Amino acid sequence: MNTYTAVIKQEDDWWIGWIVEVPGVNCQEPTRDELLETLSITLAEALAFENTNLERG
């Protein structure tokens, strides 16, 4: 299992965050909990997409 670094911060009324090791995985949500959930889902989808491309290549 790999470890990934999530950077999260609050900007006005929004929470924003991204995964350092995976470009393109960034999200914005109204609550911290929603942001963490969305980042987790988005990271999983990005990794699944990458694995699919590696299998085809």
Image: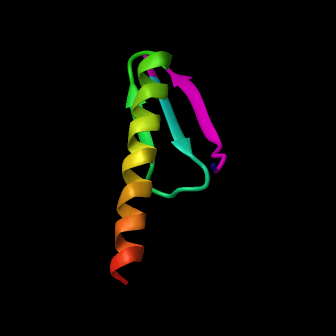
Q: Which residue sits at x=49%, y=27%? A: 36
25 or 53, which is in the foreground?
53
How many numbered circles does the render carry? 0
Q: Is residue 37 above or below residue 50?
A: above
Residue 41 picture quarter: top left
Residue 3 in magenta?
yes
Q: Is residue 57 above or below residue 7?
A: below
Find residue 40 and report its horizontal and vertical position in percent. Answer: 46, 36
Q: Which residue sits at x=48%, y=31%? A: 16
Q: Which residues are magenta?
A: 2-14
The extreme bottom residue here reads: 57
Find residue 48 and report its horizontal and vertical position in percent. Answer: 38, 56
Q: Image check: 3 left or right of 55?
A: right
Q: Which residue sits at x=50%, y=58%? A: 23
Residue 38 picture quarter: top left
Q: Is residue 54 above or below residue 7?
A: below
Residue 32 in magenta?
no
Find residue 45 and report its horizontal and vertical position in percent. Answer: 36, 49
42 or 20, which is in the foreground?
42
Q: Image check: 20 left or right of 31?
A: right
